[in-house]
Image (cartoon, rainbow, N blue to C red):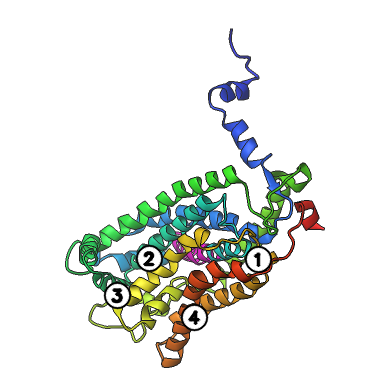
């Protein structure tokens, strides 16, 4: 017995049920009915990552990972390759847009308690993605071999060398020698590429974890009946589509009207190991961690606290013991979280300014609050906090 000619989809479904799986997970998938536009930022980050991958492949075709030719190959892309300037602008702008989306996505998760059971693995895979994106961005920042690329890498390598026992072997593994040279640049190029494509796999793992547990929502209450949910399509595909139009409009403004925001002026000058820039300043998305690194007199202490500021996020599902997820119903947490977000912004501004005493003390104050929030306030607030009554259902929360 043979399959009918008009049943090609049935033939494929019987052997590889991808159509029904797609419909189940991305069309009919039940979503909480009360999601706001902060839930769009996961889609924004995914689109930005896709644009980075595609533009990065085209840039790699014309890039040469050697000290002698790296900077000139970037100049060739900008000035001689057809539409090379546009592809590079999409790539550079995409990094900023990706980090902006990720930081808002992370802040939303903290505010609405998206790290609480049963979504701990979803939270951990998301943080793993953040670390991988930071690694790929750091490696990519070095590749143009401009002044700020070279000296920024030098700062990080020197900080890594300060780590006892493992610091020097790790730095040697990355550099392949005593300093930044052809071998180091080639290894950083490979690290950038491999990490970028590995991110795609972890995104798949992150989405799988999301589809197992379902999405959190602003009320922090699990759906209990059919009226509490709506199908992903068309409700959230249309909502994500509208948000993506606005996201891409901002992206286009950044590329076409504000290109000077995409990187620092010193990075348009070829790297010179004999001339140190007046101010070694990171890109804005690394600035908060650089501010912590610089605020501590000890090189090792600064590195530990800078890395720990991200590491502490991995422990958040177990530090927060409150049975209530959303800060909407936790008055004290609702006061403490905006100060946390403000401290992160202050660290960002401090990291992009000269290390004057005023900025150093602001960095230290913001850093102290960051650690106090996670290690003191988050564990102990549930003991004294009087939470508001939770809604009986998501339908009630929407009213």
- Determine which of the numbered discs, if any, sits on residue 366 in the image: 4
- Determine which of the numbered discs, if any, sits on residue 327 in the image: 1
- Determine which of the numbered discs, if any, sits on residue 138 in the image: 2
Image quadrant in which the N terminus is located: top right
* Disc on the earlier residue, 1 or 3: 3
* Disc on the earlier residue, 2 or 4: 2
* Disc on the earlier residue, 3 or 4: 3
Q: Position of residue 363 (x, y in %)?
A: 45, 83
Query: Mark 3 falls on what kind of element?
Result: helix
Q: Which residues are magenta?
A: 82-100
Q: Residues at badges 2 and 4 in contact (C-beta under 8 Å)? A: no
Residue 251 visible somewhere in the drawing: yes
Spatial CA span between label 2 and label 3: 20 Å
Q: 88 or 388: nearer the eye? A: 388
Query: Mark 1 falls on what kind of element?
Result: helix
Q: Position of residue 250 (x, y in %)?
A: 61, 67
Label 1 Cα crowd, 10 Å radius (few <14 / some 14-19 / many 20+): many
């Amino acid at each position: 017995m043979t399959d009918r000619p008009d049943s090609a989809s049935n033939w494929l479904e019987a052997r590889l049920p991808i159509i029904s799986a797609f419909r189940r997970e991305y069309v009919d998938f039940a979503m909480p009915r009360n999601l706001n536009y902060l839930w769009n930022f996961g889609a924004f980050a995914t689109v930005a990552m896709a644009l980075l991958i595609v533009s990065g492949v085209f840039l790699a075709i014309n890039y040469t990972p050697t000290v002698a030719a790296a900077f000139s190959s970037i100049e060739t892309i900008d000035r001689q390759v057809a539409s090379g300037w546009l592809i590079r602008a999409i790539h550079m702008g995409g990094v900023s847009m990706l980090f902006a989306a990720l930081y808002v996505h992370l802040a939303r998760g903290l505010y609405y308690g998206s790290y609480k059971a049963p979504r701990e693995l979803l939270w951990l895979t998301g943080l793993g993605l953040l670390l991988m994106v930071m690694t790929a961005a750091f490696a990519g920042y070095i590749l143009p071999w401009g002044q700020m690329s070279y000296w920024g890498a030098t700062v990080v390598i020197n900080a890594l060398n300060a780590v006892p026992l493992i610091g020097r072997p790790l730095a040697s593994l990355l550099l392949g020698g005593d300093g930044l040279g052809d071998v180091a640049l080639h290894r950083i190029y490979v690290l950038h590429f491999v990490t970028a494509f590995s991110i795609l796999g972890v995104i798949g793992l992150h989405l799988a974890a999301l589809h197992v547990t379902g999405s959190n929502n602003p009320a922090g209450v699990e759906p209990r009946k059919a009226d509490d949910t709506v199908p992903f399509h068309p409700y959230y595909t249309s909502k994500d589509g509208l948000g993506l139009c606005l996201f891409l409009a901002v992206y286009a403004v950044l590329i076409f009207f504000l290109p000077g925001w995409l990187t620092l002026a010193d990075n348009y000058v070829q790297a010179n190991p004999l001339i140190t820039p007046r101010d070694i300043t990171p890109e804005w998305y690394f600035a908060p961690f650089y501010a912590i690194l610089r605020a501590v007199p000890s090189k090792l202490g600064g590195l530990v606290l800078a890395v720990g500021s991200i590491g502490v996020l991995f422990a958040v599902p177990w530090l927060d013991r409150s049975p209530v997820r959303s800060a909407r119903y936790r008055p004290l947490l609702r006061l403490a979280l905006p100060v946390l977000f403000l401290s992160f912004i202050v660290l960002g501004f401090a990291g992009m300014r000269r290390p004057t005493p005023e900025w150093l003390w602001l960095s230290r104050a913001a850093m102290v609050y960051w650690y106090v929030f996670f290690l003191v306030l988050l564990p102990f607030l549930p003991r004294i906090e009087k939470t508001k009554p939770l809604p009986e259902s998501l339908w009630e929360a929407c009213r």
